[in-house]
């Protein structure tokens, strides 16, 4: 019995290590529990942080929206103020126009009162203005239709004398315009049409005083026998120049030249510059038929070129300016004049339709 119990007593000490090995699962469980608790607290902290950030972003968006709404309201207020300013400016312009209209009406009333105070003076002035307008119209028509420079100058001189008798400062500019137009007319020495006709007549007299001499066909004594034999049959001349040799041809060429000069005179009479130059160009062709190449031919052609370069119409840039200014002035005065004070004979010969006043 003692032997059998001896080994049992000898194996009893190794049991404590089993108890130590049983503690590790608890330790691991405690570690895992601590990790779980730490992870849960970390997750809760992260969720709170995210929630706080989202709340901050939402609050910032809300503030931005509020600022945008405030900016929109400020812009609408600015537009409303701009519209009010525009309406105020329009109202000011209307008031200013009304004030100007009141001032103009006051000036017209004052002028009407002045005219009513002296009706005879106004009637006399209207008659003189009509006389001035009639003289200006006649002078312009004499110059444009008949080419009568002297008659036009006399008409304008009479108009200037009548206008000078009107002692009114309102017609000073009209008088100055008339003086300038008279100076432009006086600067014209002669009618260009008359000068052109005179030069054509002088050229024709020169041709009649020195008619073209017939140029017999040259026949040299030393010419070959066949040229002397056929000289009366054939006439050899350059292709670009055929000179009339026979008396009948020269008579026809002279008649053609006189006809073209007559046509040039007729064109000058009606101031047809295109027909005038065309007739003189054809006259140069007849000169080539009558004269051989010589200084005399060159002189005649140069004379025709000089005549063709002459103007036929009068160039007066200021012609009619005084008449136009007078008509505008009279129409303005007729509109401003009251219906009761307007003279009965105020219609001009060139403006039969006088403006009517509103009742």
Image (tube, rainbow, N blue to C red):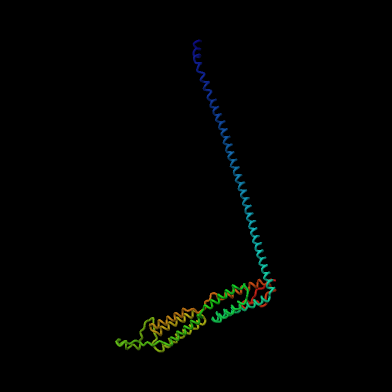
Q: For this rendering, which residue is in front, 207 or 25?
A: 207
Q: Is residue 206 left or right of residue 163?
A: left
**Residue found 66% across the figure and 63% down from its top:** 99
Q: Is residue 231 visible?
A: yes
Q: For this rendering, which residue is in front, 2 or 312?
A: 312
* Image x and y of residue 119, in percent: 68, 75
Q: Quadrant of residue 177?
A: bottom right
Classify 104 as above or below 45.
below
Q: For this rendering, which residue is in front, 241 or 254?
A: 254
* Image x and y of residue 266, in percent: 50, 83
**Residue found 64% across the figure and 59% down from its top:** 89
Q: Which quadrant of the figure contains the C terminus? A: bottom right
Q: Is residue 352 left or right of residue 236?
A: right
* Image x and y of residue 96, in percent: 65, 62
**Residue found 63% across the figure and 75% down from its top:** 167
Classify 21 as above or below 126.
above
Q: Is residue 278 left or right of residue 344?
A: left
Residue found at the very far top of the displayed protein: 2
Q: Quadrant of residue 43?
A: top right
Q: For this rendering, which residue is in front, 275 or 97?
A: 97
Classify 210 as above or below 328.
below
* Image x and y of residue 142, in percent: 56, 81
Q: Is residue 267 visible?
A: no
């Amino acid at each position: 019995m003692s032997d059998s119990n001896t080994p049992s007593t000898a194996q009893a000490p190794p049991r404590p290590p089993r108890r130590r090995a049983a503690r590790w699962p608890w330790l691991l469980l405690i570690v895992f529990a601590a990790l779980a608790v730490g992870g849960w607290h970390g997750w809760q902290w992260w969720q709170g942080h995210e929630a706080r950030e989202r709340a901050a972003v939402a609050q910032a968006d809300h503030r931005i929206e509020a600022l945008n709404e405030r900016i929109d309201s400020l812009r609408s207020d600015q537009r409303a103020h701009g519209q009010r300013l525009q309406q105020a400016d329009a109202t000011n312009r209307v008031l200013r126009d009304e004030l100007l209209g009141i001032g103009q009406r006051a000036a017209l009333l004052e002028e009407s009162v002045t005219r009513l105070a002296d009706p005879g003076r106004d009637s006399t002035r209207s008659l003189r203005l009509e006389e001035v307008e009639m003289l200006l119209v006649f002078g312009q028509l004499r110059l444009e239709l008949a080419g009568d420079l002297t008659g036009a100058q006399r008409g304008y001189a009479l108009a200037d004398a009548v206008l000078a008798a009107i002692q009114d400062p309102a017609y000073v500019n009209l008088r100055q315009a008339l003086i300038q137009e008279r100076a432009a007319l006086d600067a014209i020495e002669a009618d260009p049409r008359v000068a052109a006709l005179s030069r054509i007549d002088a050229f024709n007299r020169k041709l009649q005083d020195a008619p073209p001499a017939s140029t017999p066909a040259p026949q040299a004594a030393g010419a070959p026998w066949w040229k002397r034999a056929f000289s009366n049959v054939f006439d050899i001349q350059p292709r670009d120049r055929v000179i009339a040799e026979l008396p009948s041809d020269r008579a026809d060429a002279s008649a053609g030249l006189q006809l073209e000069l007559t046509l040039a005179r007729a064109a000058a009479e009606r101031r047809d510059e295109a027909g005038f130059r065309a007739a003189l160009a054809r006259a140069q062709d007849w000169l080539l038929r009558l004269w051989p190449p010589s200084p005399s031919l060159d002189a005649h052609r140069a004379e025709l070129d000089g005549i063709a370069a002459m103007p036929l119409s009068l160039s007066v840039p200021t012609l009619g300016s005084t008449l136009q200014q007078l008509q505008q002035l009279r129409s303005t005065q007729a509109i401003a004049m009251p219906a009761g004070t307007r003279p009965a004979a105020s219609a001009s010969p060139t403006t039969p339709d006088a403006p009517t006043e509103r009742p």
